């Protein structure tokens, strides 16, 4: 999200802002909001309608949907294909951050690489920004667990040899393949809804803490991307257009200018691409390119990637005051637990600038701006 604020307007109030966000957006394992627990009928609508349900309920703006991949709703979702256990796990988790590498980050535009592209996204130097990273919570995790068992059996049934059990699969037109796509669409729609509700609570928190009107704050959604999904898309393969299933895991769509799936107001520049880093360094906004469409099915990476396991990170951080280290760098961090904070130390991740330089140099994404954090909530 971008705002109408500049860094100097919030820098001295970042503690209050982050404390407000931490209070309004539940984080950590099993987190939930008591005032947003769905009945079965409402949950079904969430799984079918995605972020459109959230806006219907007053969470955010209709114009937000134009800046969400697939307008916040994957079609052909099948709520009946989602287990009762998955539904139970997700029922109280909408509007929550969860744990692990999920975060809400308030930062600012530290560097502009392309003024025209930045202007088209409404971004300029020192402008305050917000990044939200979370997904389908326990519901999506359970859908994955449920269908791993289904797919292991399916791979045997269809004579598919697996180099690793985690690569279990089924033909896309098989009963199992179609069922999984329907269940996965439900999880994606839950994730879109989750982020949309958090977007709304980010706006509310800024209004409450800074005592500013929505018109002054101008907190607008730049883009919301998937980065763990399989989608049916049309791509050129061996010289002809074919319908294919593109798997993006830790990757994100990066469609070029003039692609019909790019929002109208970005049609001339290409789809926004978000590549977050770690809580102590920086994140990037790029745009998609024609070369990505030709070479990577319109995809690029999403995030820096870990270099230390969670266990190794804990070992590295033993005896350190991680929060104080970050505070000394001008970054205020709130976390649901100390364990999460030490697992997410900056050196647990690659330097995202190295990753982005490769993406930019390979031509599968074009750098627009660098963002630096001022405050972070970790799940």
Image (cartoon, helix red, strand yellow):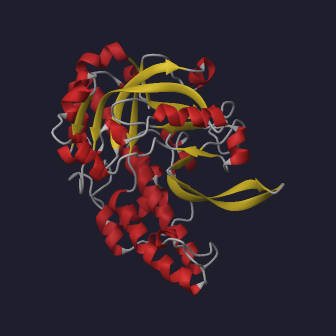
* 284 in relation to 126, above or below: below
Task: Say left or right for 343 vs 283.
Answer: left
Which residue is located at x 36 percent, y 45 percent? 197
**Residue 204, located in which quarter of the rendered image?**
top left
Query: Position of 148 compared to 213: left or right?
Result: right
**Above or below for 111 versus 316:** above
Looking at this rendering, what residue extends furthest in the top direction? 8
Q: Position of residue 64 (x, y in %)?
A: 49, 39
- Name the image quarter holding residue 307: top left
**Residue farthest toward the left in the current orientation of the protein:** 319
User: Camera-side residue: 161 or 201?
Assistant: 161
- Pinpoint residue 16: horizontal percent, then vertical percent: 20, 26
Rendered location of residue 113, percent (x, y): 57, 21
Position above or below: 243 against 276: below
Count the labels in the image: 0
Horizontal relation, residue 337 to residue 359: left or right: left
Residue 302 point in image, percent of width and height: 50, 44
Q: Residue furthest right?
A: 239
Tell me: residue 320, above or below residue 343.
above
Residue at left offset 35%, top offset 57%: 137
Query: Can residue 323 be seen in the rendering of this structure?
Result: yes
Q: Quadrant of the N terminus?
A: top left
Task: State the residue at coordinates (65%, 45%).
Answer: 261
Residue 17 visible from this viewpoint: no
Q: Nearer the viewer, residue 339 or 222?
A: 339
């Amino acid at each position: 999200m971008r705002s109408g604020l500049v860094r100097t307007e919030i820098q001295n109030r970042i503690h209050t802002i982050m404390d407000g966000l931490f209070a309004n957006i539940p984080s950590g394992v099993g987190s939930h909001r008591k005032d947003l627990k769905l009945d079965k009928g409402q949950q079904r609508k969430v799984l079918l309608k995605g972020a459109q349900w959230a806006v219907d309920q007053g969470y955010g703006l209709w114009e937000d949907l134009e800046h969400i991949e697939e307008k916040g709703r994957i079609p052909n979702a099948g709520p009946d294909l989602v287990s009762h256990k998955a539904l139970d796990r997700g029922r109280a988790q909408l509007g929550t951050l969860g744990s692990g590498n999920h975060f809400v980050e308030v930062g600012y535009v530290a560097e502009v690489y392309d003024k025209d592209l930045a202007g088209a996204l409404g971004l300029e130097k020192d402008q305050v920004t917000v990044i939200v990273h979370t997904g389908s919570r326990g519901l999506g995790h359970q859908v994955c667990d449920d269908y791993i068992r289904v797919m292991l059996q399916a791979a045997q049934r269809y004579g598919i040899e697996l180099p690793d059990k985690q690569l279990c699969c089924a033909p896309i037109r098989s009963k199992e393949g179609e069922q999984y796509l329907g269940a996965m669409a439900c999880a994606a729609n839950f994730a879109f809804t989750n982020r949309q509700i958090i977007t709304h609570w980010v706006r509310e928190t800024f209004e409450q803490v800074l005592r500013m009107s929505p018109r002054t704050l101008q907190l607008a959604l730049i883009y919301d991307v998937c980065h763990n999904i399989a989608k049916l898309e049309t791509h050129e393969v061996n010289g002809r257009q074919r319908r294919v299933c593109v798997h993006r895991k830790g990757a994100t769509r990066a469609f070029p200018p003039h692609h019909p799936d790019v929002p109208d107001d970005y049609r001339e520049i290409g789809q926004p691409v978000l590549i977050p880093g770690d809580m102590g360094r920086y994140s990037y906004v790029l745009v998609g390119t024609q070369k990505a469409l030709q070479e990577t099915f319109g995809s690029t990476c999403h995030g820096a990637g870990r270099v230390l396991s969670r266990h190794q990170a804990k070992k590295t951080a033993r005896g350190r005051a991680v929060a104080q280290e970050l505070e000394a760098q001008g970054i205020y961090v709130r976390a649901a637990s100390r364990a999460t904070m030490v697992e997410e130390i900056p050196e647990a991740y690659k330097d995202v600038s190295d990753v982005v330089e490769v993406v930019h140099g390979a031509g599968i994404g074009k750098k627009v701006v660098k963002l630096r954090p001022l405050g972070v909530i970790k799940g």
